[in-house]
Amino acid sequence: MDTTEPLWARTAAELGRAVACGDIGAAEVVDSHLERIAATNPAVGAVTQLLADRARAQARDLDRRRAAGEDLGPLAGVPFTVKENLAIGGVPTTHGIARFKDFTAPADAPPVARLRAAGAIPIGHSNMPDLALGGVHSRSELFGDTRNPWDRTRTPGGTSGGDGAAVATGMAPLGLGNDSGGSVRIPASFCGVTALKPTAGRFAADHRLGEDDPTLASQLIPVDGPLARTVGDLRLAYEALAGPDPRDPRTAPVPLYPPDSAAAPPAKVAVVTDPGGLGVHPHVRDAVRTAADRLADAGHEVVEVPDVPRLEEALETYATLVMTEFALAWPHIGPIVPAGSRAYIEMSMDRATGGDLGGYLRATAVRLTVQRAWARFLDTYPLLLGPVFTEPPIEPGLESSGPEGHRRVTEAMRLCAAVSLVGVPAVAVPTGVRDGLPLGVQLIGGAWREDLCLAAAETVEAGTGRLTPVGG
């Protein structure tokens, strides 16, 4: 550990080890990050509800426990941010809108509880689009805009953009968001950090509003996932978050690392630079090639393939399942969504097809067809390398600016949407900086093979180094 770095600039792994052995106190770690938030957040707008007193109290308790000889866990004293749609007990879960500003959570959401059990400390909520419906730019009715710390004229991405910007600037080593079509991967790529979208069912979750569970697509597609500045920190979060939980019957007791996985040779990698052949920016194309070269140099067999399986069907099915449910709920949801956030979701509903009952039922069948095709593909190629977003970081609100902007954004995130429909894991990792903006790729594995994604992402990261923290 570089002891000349301020505490807020160090990794979660470094901080957890140092707090656990008593080299530094958890209270020192929290105070350093609170100072960084005070200095940086006014310009970036990532942290919404700051939990300074709560975080200091938890840190003091950790320090007392360490002095008493207790094992504090691998993330001892590590601060983390929590997206505004994930519950922290005793704190409002606002979803970014005025309607829920006093919607105080009775208990931690399962992933918040898991990180807290590993010793981590929630330091604040983080910004997102209104109800996670407003698009890929993190702007909310209650908290305004989150700005990309690399370039204020670009979006940090979304919908977990507050976490991406907070982690990138050193306000916290870890962020906790969720992903239903790129919502942790896109902010990671736009902000120069890493993120994990796990296999559906790997992490316990609770996305209820009140007592009612969400409908089918909202049960099958969204997953909670961490953001971090290094893949090593992402791995620590993965190990803390994984495993079954009685609060979520979907979670499965699958081993984090298959037997003998550490001794296995490097996995075969398929490379798709331009999914669907719809176009890709030259800088993004170069990022994918850079990652492919690093994997090949590390011993992976890297094969360029024409495309991913059944992409068009995957995207149509994704849109039909999600937007049919939105359309049915829109008479109830629409009136509470601020006017500025309605355009994106309304254009998305207009673009979706098959929105009647018959079309919806057909989509539930096609989803399995697509999953089967991907399972066969990922049996041949255990890893898939491709873009997160087929353009560099975009300007805020492009997706809501009109039909052309909406089309550009929807097409640019197409691989993210397909991966979410299929339910397999993916890790977003930076490859470098072009024209002052970070670029990244995603590594996608078969179901339950987060280990392959993380290991390959570490290989890519080794050639890049750590891009963040950056100034606010």
Image (cartoon, grey):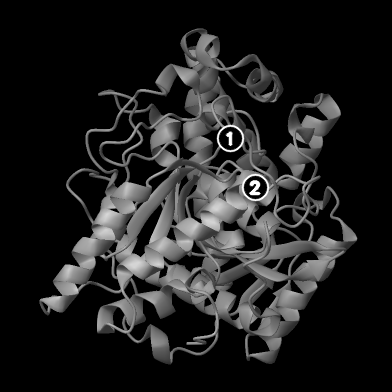
Q: Residues within 10 Å of mark 2 (few under 14, many from 20)?
A: many
Q: Nearer the viewer, mark 2 or mark 1?
A: 2
Which residue, given by chain and number where applicable, does mark 1 sit on?
317
Which residue, given by chain and number where applicable, does mark 2 sit on?
44
Q: Amino acid at mark 1?
A: Thr
**Viewer-proximal residue among 195 and 128:** 128
In the rendered image, residue 424, in percent from the top left (x then y), is placed at 48, 56
What whole-number distance in Å separates the C-alpha atoms at marks 2 and 1?
36 Å
Q: Is residue 161 above or below residue 131?
A: below
Q: Is residue 73 in view from this perspective?
A: yes
Q: Residue at x 35, y 75 (%)?
A: 16
Q: Residue at x 22, y 33 (%)?
A: 106
> Label 1's element?
helix
Query: Which circle's residue, 2 or 1, is located before the other in the chain?
Result: 2
Q: Quadrant of residue 129?
A: top right
Q: In the image, is 30 to the left or to the right of 420?
A: left
Q: In the image, is 435 to the left or to the right of 48?
A: right
In the rendered image, residue 467, in percent from the top left (x then y), is placed at 67, 72
**Viewer-proximal residue among 59 and 246:** 59
Q: Is residue 422 above or below residue 286?
A: above
The number of callouts visible is 2
Q: Is residue 452 in view from this perspective?
A: no
Q: Amino acid at mark 2?
A: Val
